[in-house]
Image: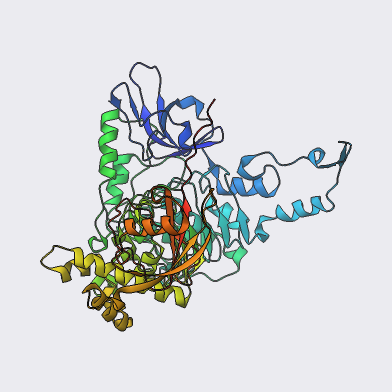
Amino acid sequence: MSVNSRVLVGRSRATVKYVGPVAGLEGTWLGLEWDDVSRGKHDGEVEGIKYFQCSKPGAGSFVRAEKVSTRGRSVLEALLSRYSNECGELGLPDVRDEELYVPTVRHHRVHIQVVGADKITSQQSQTQRLTSARLVGAGISHVGDPEALARAAINLHELDLTGNLVHSWDFVAELVSALPGLKVASLEPSLPCLQELHLAGNGIRSLQPPCAQQIESGIRNISDSSEQTMKSDVRTQQSPCAQQPCKPQGSNNTAPAQQQQQQQQQDLPGCTQQPCQPQGSGNAAPAQQQQQQQQQQNLPEPDDSGGCRGVSGFQCLKVLSLQDNQLADWHEVSRLSSLPALHTLNISNNPIPSIRCPNPESEQGAASYFPSLTTLYAAACSLSDWTDVDELNKLPALQELRLTGNPLLGQSKTGGRFEIIGRVGRLRMLNGSSVNTRERTDAEIRYMQKALSEMEALQDSNKAATMARLHPRLPQLAQRHGAVLSTATRTSSNSSIASSMIEVTLTCVATTPGAKMGSTKKKLPLSTTLAALRTLCEKLCKVKAISQKISLRSPDAPFPEEISTDDETLTLGQLGMQNGVELFIDENVSEEPPSS
């Protein structure tokens, strides 16, 4: 057992953050960070001594080492157990025949018999025929015997490993090198035809692959051993690692923290010069030393120009699910950028604080960066700046995006939908709702108006440079909507009253007593403040300004967005409103406990 190992305690998953003694207590203790935060008791600090750091506040606790009875099993063990009906999903016992019944109106149980169940079980147990497998919550921590797995899963193309104990990409590299369907030519391996890989809820922290020679050697060994089974001609050559073989990673025992750090600092190492370190035992360093090692591991790695290795060779991988893991840096996600067929990536609920993509003009950006990625799910991350959304516009094929649950949208004054559409130019689907041509046009114009209002308020002497940094798409939108931009400029200069007016539909949806429901069209100056708008709505809708909840829906938008801001001096122009918008006026009803 070592730091960053994934373990099961009962049916709860956790990550080992510390192994060793605890002051005032006897024996060896494991400091765990629970996937289920509610099981935690602290952040790794007990009586003033800091043993480890949790990525989620309050998710840590100590457990005696002997109480961690389940330390994971191999993929093959889980595959055979699941598809021979020895156990059900999530490791639960399979349903017994006596548990299958239909209740009658008189509360009797009429037992039923599943016709052909034995035949289905017999067919499923022949794992060589499986093309897809679902091993959710099966307690998998390592690959196991790669040759046996290759024989047992010769036709496997889709694999769901959600909710297991995988903690690094080394496991994935070893797994796919063990799967059949491999082709080896001129020492350049083409990794298997794995099309979908689901690794949600595993606690993965890094996507750094092992050395290329290790994967190549593993592929060649599996191909040689299964040559008769696969009936394919394989050209074999001497591996550069033959003299210094690398020990396969992804097994029960992980390398010590210091050795892992040394491996992370290597640039595409050749195994003859930098052989892989032997894997360590469960002996733990003192608390202070382990904390220093963990801090070293969390240091930011060099950018792509510094030689950090990316994931490559998965020529057929199209869908990759990594949600609910522990990826804390976009740099780790960038390791996947060279996968040629990857079109759907789910990184939701990972503590990623920012996004940085290479510029298309730079040398790094010249190489294709996520060339086929059309769908990105990044909900419930830690994105809090609009520059992160601007970076996503650099992805050349991005069409669907999900950003719900990020601090960025919670801080937005207008909900953020039109700003995301304005900043990312190729979106067709945002947060589960389609973006049609009319909504895109309206959103881009509204975004331009908001940006121009911000420019007027800037006190910076170099407004052009500031706007280019805050709104990099603005020049492109100016070319596309030049006439509208010209009109907006004249409006901002107050050239005439008529040019500064927009038509707004005020719709009262409040159901409180006295509210006047219905719709009214009004022409309002863009200089109207939010406070003045509330006063007008109070007069028309009979809803007090102090309790109003106003939502805005642009023409052809799928749903309204609440205007949530405490700055009542903001104008309609600064809020990005345009001609034809509809405002919904509701009343915030405070939920007070009934008086006794």
Residue for point 32% across, 29% down? 51
Residue 290 is situated, as x and y percent measured from the top left of the image, at: 29, 34
Q: Is residue 44 above or below residue 440?
A: above
Residue 55 is situated, as x and y percent measured from the top left of the image, at: 36, 40
Q: Find the residue positioned furthest to the left.
A: 461
Residue for point 80% across, 50% down? 118
Q: Quadrant of the N terminus?
A: top left
Residue 338 is situated, as x and y percent measured from the top left of the image, at: 38, 67
Q: Is residue 103 left or right of residue 424?
A: right
Residue for point 25% across, 59% down? 303
Q: Quadrant of the C terminus?
A: top right
Q: Is residue 363 above or below residue 409?
A: below
Residue 306 is situated, as x and y percent measured from the top left of the image, at: 23, 60
Visible in this render: residue 373? no
Q: How many marks?
A: 0
- The one nearer the camera, 160 or 435, is 435
- The one nearer the camera, 403 or 181, is 403
Visible in this render: residue 293? yes
How was the colour assigned to the protein in this rendering?
rainbow
Q: Is residue 376 left or right of residue 274?
A: right
Q: Quadrant of residue 88?
A: top right
- The one nearer the camera, 122 or 438, is 438
Q: Is residue 361 above or below residue 353?
A: below
Q: Is residue 595 left or right of residue 492?
A: right
